[in-house]
Amino acid sequence: MQLYNTQHIKLYNTLTSEKEIFQPITDGYVGMYVCGPTVYSNVHLGNVRTFMSFDMIFRYLKHLGYKVRYVRNITDAGHLENDADVGEDKITKKARLEAIEPMEIVQRYTVDFHNVLNTFNFLPPSIEPTATGHIIEQIELIQSIIDNGFAYTVNGSVYFDVHKYNESNEYGILSKRKLEDLIHNTRALDGQSDKKNPQDFALWKKAEPTHIMRWPSPWSDGFPGWHLECTAMSTKYLGDYFDIHGGGMDLKFPHHECEIAQNQASKGQAPVKYWMHANMLELNGARMSKSTGNYINPAELLSGDNDIMSKAYNPSVIRFFMMQASYRSVLDLTDDGLSAAEKGFHRLMDAIGIIDNLKTSSSSSFTVTDWKQKCYDAMNDDFNTPILIATLFEAVKFINQVKDGSATVTPEDLTVLKETIETFIFDVLGLVNISKESSGGNKLTGAVEILIKLRKEARLNKDFALSDKIRDELAEAGIQLNDSREGTTFTTN
Ligand code: AMP
Ligand code: ZN
């Protein structure tokens, strides 16, 4: 029996604004689509946070035994600088500025994206399709939207007729906007646009003679509108109606709203059962964003080569920091937050490091099965990773108590405890054990602990010359012993 038969997820559906019991369309199978990056520059930490939220969700669904097809696209064409269908294609612009091929830009930043995600221990999606690889599917979609009367052609470009669509459908259903309000809040067209109404959006744009990325179509040599690729690729690989569609909060409108309209207009049905939106990462209290210059790239944070943080941080510490917030909360990236996360992360790893050496007893002073279910309850409640982490720390406290003799555990409970803590930390949260990884870390700890023990014995025997010698020689080797009422710990420099 799969775990999903007993562990029932409730997830927040943006479409209904409610937490709903997750019931996949096909029992045991989950189709999940997440909007991927536009590969015209290095990803920043904000982008990483959104993809990490869905990596965690992917991991948990898999852990519960679902067969998940996770599709995350690469936008390599069609994303204009401005959401209102004007301006240059982001990739083409970068290529022009650097005097190289657009596909060189795409290649460079796709490689960067993959390297960054590998550094943060992401699982690869099941399919990673590109917009340029699905031009035919996009042309077919446009044709069916035209055939159904929801799009019009002007001077070789094709626009989605939002007003016509809204007569029989609800444009704004996801973002809770009303067309009347949108009309009220948008400026009238300035005569430069081919659109009937400012709310209409491009399905196909005729390319200017200088535009390099272009494809033939029944309407003109041109390129698809940005919203279209996600409709084409999600439905191609997941079907016309699939389980989960995700992305950052900022994509809710217009991007995801337009995806719903395109699907409804071409296939006569809504595309998605559960819409999920990850919240934004902030820096200095403002949203991290390339366009405002308020951002930090992963490489700068990992190397410490930046003016914002006091030092370099390990990818697992950064991942742990992000997992300490719910994916639906805004999170501010700060030096204090990262260093607190670093301490917490090491406490967690230290506890894992001593589990195997704990002495077992004939009874337990901790109900491990209840605690295990609490871990699941946290994740089942809309993937609540901060509550999960708080629950994991209950086990850390218990492990330390068993170590110092103030609590007891049976061998069976210890096995469950170890399995559960490792499953959630490594498989679900996707953290990597740094001390295990940087080989020698554990061995060093072990060796220093032996010396600490010998020094304690020397002091008990009043052999202060030996105890001082141990302390001083360790200090010379860069290892400081710190004595306190709780015992002796050490730090390295
Ligand atoms: P883009 O490459 O601009 O299309 O963005 C890729 C993904 O990153 C989208 O899902 C965005 O919603 C998301 N994103 C952009 N900025 C942030 C941010 N500051 N925090 C979290 N996610 C973000
Ligand atoms: Zn998308």
Image (tube, helix red, strand yellow):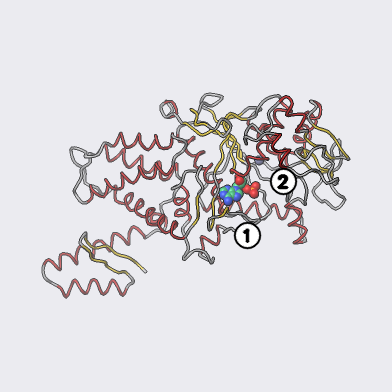
* Extreme residue in the left direction: 461
Residue 256, above or below 81: above
Ligand 1 within 8 Å, label 1 CB: no
Q: Nearer the viewer, residue 91 or 414?
A: 91
The crowd level at tag 1 (other Cα within 10 Å; few <14, some 14-19, many 20+) is few
Q: Nearer the viewer, residue 272 or 362?
A: 272
Q: Position of residue 254 (x, y in %)?
A: 68, 40
Q: Which residue is mark 2?
A: 83
Residue drawn at x 25%, y 39% as measured from the top left:
366
**Under tag 1, what secondary structure?**
loop
Task: Give the percent coordinates (x, y) of residue 115.
Answer: 58, 53
Badge 1 is on which residue? Answer: 293
Q: Quadrant of the C terminus?
A: bottom left
Question: Looking at the image, which is closer to me, 278 or 48?
Answer: 278
Query: Of callouts 2 and 1, which one flags the residue occurring earlier in the amino acid sequence?
Result: 2
Type of residue at label 1?
Gly
Give the quarter of the image for residue 342: bottom left
Mark 2 to mark 1: distance in Å? 19 Å
- Element marked by disc 2: loop
Residue at figure coordinates x 31%, y 60% from the top left: 445
Q: Which mark is residue 236?
A: none
Q: Is mark 2 within 8 Å of ligand 1?
A: no
Q: Quadrant of residue 418?
A: top left
